[in-house]
Image (spheres, rainbow, N blue to C red):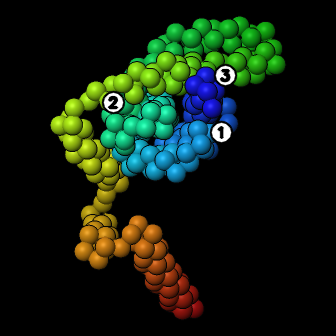
């Protein structure tokens, strides 16, 4: 597969990342684990794509946009990072190092597009509303989303792969071993940081015992993620059944007192 075709395919994945929640509905296609798998599938290395997508998902699990405020574009960052890793043979550590600044840069690009193109389209839409032209409004909406997805999805990913893969490969080969060792150590902290961000938002005092239980199962009993997930599911079902029985008992007691 030629470089141009690789760039086109990765650009399509980037387009899908931006079109999700705008043109296609909220399918969560822009999640790193989906983007990595799609890039791997299209570039002929599905295994690497899935592995990198899962790693990126762990890194960015705690990142979310609040309201209309743009956040780091984890979809585009994961897409370009995975594409570079597959096309240049770079390691996971290098892919992470490339993906983080890309995701941050795309956040600023998102703000730029929202501040320039989007307001112009809104003024055209206001004129269409005044004329009562429903079809023009719908067309304008679709055009706006297509332009948004192309500018922030297809074009960055296409250019990054087409013009950047050779440069990235040379840069990777020029990185000293001591720097690579440092990147390896830092990359191992990223998943923990992502989980910490997530726990900061969701963790409650009542959930601490379950967190400790999961840690013991994974750290001391060496159970894998599937085993821990199945145990967690069983515990959740038991708790649900207990609460359901308690609720039924309370309802029965209330009926007896009423009689």
Label 2: which residue?
Answer: 172
Tell me which corner region of the image, top left, top right, bottom left or bottom right, holds residue 135: top right
Tell me the number on the disc at residue 211: none
Relative side of 125 to 213, left or right: right
Which residue sits at x=43%, y=38%? 89
Of 133 and 34, nearer the camera is 34
- Mark 3 vs mark 1: which is more N-terminal? 1
Badge 3 density bin: few <14, some 14–19, many ≥20, Cα 10 Å: some
Which residue sits at x=63%, y=32%? 1
Q: Is residue 200 visible?
A: no
Badge 2 density bin: few <14, some 14–19, many ≥20, Cα 10 Å: some
The C terminus: image quadrant? bottom right
Label 3: which residue?
Answer: 146
x, y (%) of residue 198? 34, 50
Label 1: which residue?
Answer: 25
Under circle 3, the secondary element is: helix
User: Viewer-nearest of labels 3 and 1?
Assistant: 3
Tell me which corner region of the image, top left, top right, bottom left or bottom right, holds residue 173: top left
User: Viewer-nearest of labels 2 and 3?
Assistant: 2
Of 32 and 238, nearer the camera is 32
């Amino acid at each position: 597969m030629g470089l141009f075709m690789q760039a086109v395919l990765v650009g399509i994945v980037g387009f899908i990342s931006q079109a999700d929640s705008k043109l296609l509905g909220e399918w969560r296609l822009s999640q790193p684990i989906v983007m990595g798998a799609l890039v791997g599938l299209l570039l002929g290395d599905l295994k690497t794509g899935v592995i990198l997508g899962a790693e990126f998902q762990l890194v960015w699990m705690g990142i979310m946009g609040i309201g209309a405020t743009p956040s780091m574009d984890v979809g585009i960052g994961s897409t370009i990072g995975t594409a570079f890793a597959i096309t240049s043979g770079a390691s996971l550590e290098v892919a992470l190092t490339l993906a983080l600044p890309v995701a941050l840069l795309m956040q600023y690009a998102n703000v730029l597009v929202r501040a320039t193109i989007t307001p112009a389209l809104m003024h055209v839409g206001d004129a269409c509303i005044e004329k009562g032209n429903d079809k023009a409004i719908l067309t304008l909406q679709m055009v706006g989303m297509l332009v948004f997805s192309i500018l922030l999805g297809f074009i960055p990913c296409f250019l990054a792969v087409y013009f950047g893969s050779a440069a990235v490969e040379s840069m990777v080969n020029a990185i000293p071993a001591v720097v690579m060792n440092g990147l390896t150590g830092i990359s191992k902290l990223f998943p923990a940081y992502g989980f910490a961000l997530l726990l900061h938002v969701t963790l409650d005092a009542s959930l601490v015992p379950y967190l400790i239980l999961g840690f013991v199962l994974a750290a001391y009993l060496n159970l894998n993620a599937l085993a821990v997930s199945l145990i967690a599911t069983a515990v959740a079902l038991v708790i649900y059944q207990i609460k359901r029985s308690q609720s039924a008992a309370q309802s029965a007691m209330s009926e007896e007192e009423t009689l």
